[in-house]
Amino acid sequence: MKCDNLQLPFAVRFGVGCVATAMAVLAFIPFSVRAQTSAPETFQRDPKQAIDESYTQLIRKYTTAPALNSPLTDYLPASDSVPTPAKVLGDVAGAPDVLPYAEETYRYFRMLAAASPRVKVYSIGHSEEGREMIAVAVADAALLAQAKENGARLAQLADPRRLQLDDTKAQALINQSAPVYYITGAIHSPETGAPTALMELAYRLAVDNAPYVQYIRAHLITLITPVVEVDGRDRMVDVYKWHKAHPGQNWPYLVYWGHYVAHDNNRDAMVMTLELTKNVLNTYLEWHAQVLHDLHESVPFLYDNTVGDGPYNSWIDPILTDEWAMLASDNMARLQSFGMPGAFTHGNFDTWSPSYLMFLAGMHNGISRLYETFGNDGADTEKRVLSPGEYARTWYRPNPPYPTVLWSQRDNNNYEEAALLSTLSYFAHNAKLFLNNFYLKSKRSVEKPRNEGPAAYVLAQDDGSWNRQMQLLKVLALQHVEIQRLTKAATVALPPPPHKEGEEPKPGTPPPPSSQTFPVGSFVIRMDQPFSRAADALLDRQFWAPDDPQKEPYDDTGWSLGDLFNAKVSRVVDTGILSAPMSPVPDLTQIPTDELGPGPFYVVNNSAQVSLASLVYALQGAADVSIGEENFESDGHKFAAGSLIIGRVEMSKLKPLLEQFDLTAVSLARQPSVKAHPAAAPRIAFMHTWLSTQAEGWWRMAFDKLHVPFVYINTQTVSKEADLRSKYDVIVFAPVGYSSTQEIVDGLPMWGNALPWQTSSLTPNLGKLDSTEDLRPGLGEAGVAHLKDFVQQGGLLITSEDTAQFAIEEGMAPGVFVAPPKTLKVVGSVLSSAVVDNKRPIAYGYEGAIALYSSSGLAFTVSNLTVNRDILTAKDYKRPTGRGGPDDEDTPQGRPAEKAPPLPSPKAWEATPLNEEQERNNPFLIPPEYRPQVILRYAAMKDLLLSGLLDNGDSLAEHPVVVLAQFGKGGVLLFANNPMYRGETVGSYALVFNSIINFEHLK
Ligand SMILES: [Zn+2]
């Protein structure tokens, strides 16, 4: 319907473009607890409310230019009873030189809650290091008092099955309910501004009588977690204090943020390995919030990046993409109207991967949002020089940031608060619309099987996959996805296979199966549940077109968890599966296991479980554990090579361990007759650099969670430790992440002052995981020599990606080279590989194709020489000019032809064999027993890509990806992939652990 001039004033008054819509809004009012009105025309303060003059003066003093503030935030309302942030900070929020610890921030919020009935503080859990996380709710006292009842109504909207999908019932609930808007700050520790901005925001929401603020607190509950990464926050404040105490000096970089990972704490929303992820999602879902809005600081001056750029995640409801656009469009328009430069919403961030914290909302029928504001990594006021790309005026950024700017933490806080307050106002004024959308998205998630599908994902009951299935199902449980189990076998129709143009079925080949039967006990993830999208996005495969207009994926392009967990997941489109008999699995730890027989021998079949090493270490000294070297049969049971044979064990010791580690064992009356070697529980050292600890942190977490013990050392200790072999059997040198051999060896340049990472009274939170008086020195030439000695004396060095390259470049992996990538493009993709020789202990338990995570397509080549020389092969041979056609042989005239010996034609994963001529007196020739063993190779081109982006994959296809190099008496295990990455690559963990428990028997 068109709006004409006569109707316009009415429409404007209701803040909508058209009368018909305005009437629709009015129609809700009779049912509403509090009437919803149009958006306010201004954000004017209440002229009758006094201003806190001294606080206001300091806001203005610390704001470096008037345009960098808004009418919403350039004053602070006064209160007789409610303390301002200055009570704890000693200065205003965003003041220079002031950076509070998480605990100080909490102290303020608790003071606020004690002083105002509009504020409540909840403890929501703890970090890995035991620091508390909180959520602060702010709303009218009446609304807060009703939060439980409000939550109970929202819970029904969140699960429309409880309303029989009845829209009328939903409308009644919508009309009575207030939405919850959840804001989180300081997940990224060097991005320091959010805690003080959120302290002041809470004060304003509780105290300010401006009509727009009154409206917000009457119509929605604002929920705030001021510090998400609490461990990292406290370390960051320590570093900042050190910096303030050492003027004129360089200060230490934040080498640890959280206990395990740094920036990647915002890539954990899929597998949910970190406490902060679990605490935020549980809080978000307990409150049945509609928005999760995460605050970051890396872009000038404010980038509302949720609109960003394509490709968008394929599994979200289209309603969400329009909500992003609505919210950002209003939000940016408001900031423009305040005259604040550099606020924009388009830009290069693609919303493809669901790994970001905020995306927990996107996957759970809410709205994910993220601001990037500008930060100085601390509370110093600094002159900032922007890059041309940052200050360019573009179509989506007509009012760009200044090319140079004096920038303060207060400026940052002004932007964060002004943007949040205006967006909260918009959300409050459109609360019913967003609640209705929340209900619709939840309902459409339940209706998924009958709309876009699929109907379900099924993990077929299979003893061999049980352990890895459990790891995957636990992730789904953390995501609050419902899991069911078939109580009878179920058969589903399979869709016809995709028909390829011009491809005729070969005569004699049987037609593809048209149905599939899943046995009783199979796990079913039904798609007619509220969080079906979370499961769908994680279990489906991803395809990023090589010619996608987006040439710079922001993060990984593939993550299909069924592949990465080595747990086959069937995508079932036949809705018949939904009526198969099944029952819910409310608690995965309560699934009854088979009775363990009387022994005295037990065998745990090796099917590449993640936790065989866990069991070996736990049984150390309490049992005899050996490892069968061949496939074997005993008492009618079949076991694969690599199976654990356990004797001399108390059943009371073994049974709880099997349960803890999701393992099953077969009881045998007699010791099986198979060639076996004792399972090793070698002494492991984890060596980290001081360059970066994040990539190794993911490995460290995997070892910790699986209870595989290690000593934590660093490159500097190794440079001083001559006799590593006497202390350790295995050294794990996990990837550093984008580092070079030169950086690993040399560390940072040594001019300037030392950069200590140590516990002190000034820095009580540093130096706990590991410490050094100076972060700068690297491994050094001495450290390289010590590592070489360690391997030559029989140690095992485990490397991956850049540390594998380091081992190759330092000469510790004779005959292994990096395959030239040519024009290859891989961006965080899931690629398929195959076992070259499954008699090798490292590959024990693996069968068929193995999915691997590749960050950028690293692959190896192997050679029988220590030098990378091209040796002519049949594939590369080009015939010379002469008689005959292109495929004929030339014939010398005047004598009989001599047959040339055939040129070698090795596979891409094999070394080219040398002839006698090439081997004679060749000092570079590697003796056969010292040649590298290729354990895994990449799949052929047609099978290579499982998920994500792969372009020009020929330089990767069939090339070695996991290789054991021989060096002296020991070995260097080289992974071109990253087998322990973000908790996502559970399926490749056993490659690492096999190498550990078969230590000394790897050849
Ligand atoms: Zn960030």
Image (cartoon, grey):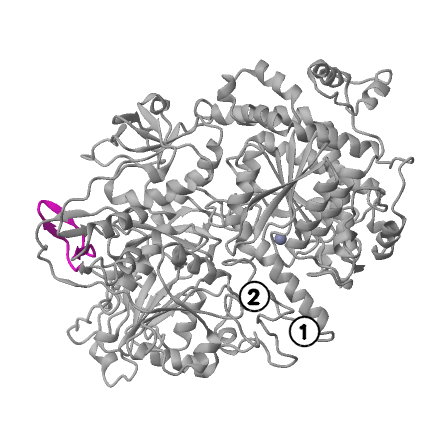
Query: Label 2, label 1: how many angstroms apart (C-alpha)?
Result: 14 Å
**Residue displayed at 12% across by 45% down:** 637
How many numbered marks does the figure carry?
2
For label 1, the SS is loop
x and y, in percent, of residue 79 in the image: 83, 42
At 24% from the left edge and 86% from the top edge, which residue is drawn?
A: 921
| Quarter-of-image position of residue 865 | bottom left
Q: Nearer the viewer, residue 699 or 455?
A: 699
Classify mark 2: helix, strand or loop.
Answer: loop
Magenta region includes residue 383: no
Which segment is the magenta one? 628-647
Q: Earlier in the sequence, mark 2 or mark 1?
A: 1
Quadrant in which the C terminus is drawn: bottom left
Q: Residues within 10 Å of mark 2 (few under 14, many from 20)?
A: many
Q: To which residue does mark 1 refer?
A: 250
Task: Please state the horizontal and vertical placement of residue 659, each as a whole percent of the image.
Answer: 29, 46
Q: Quadrant of the N terminus?
A: top right
Direction from residue 720 to residue 570 in the image, left or right: left
Along the line of sight, the residue nearer the viewer: 603 or 746: 603
Q: Which residue is mark 2?
A: 255
| Residue kind at label 1, given as amino acid type | Asn
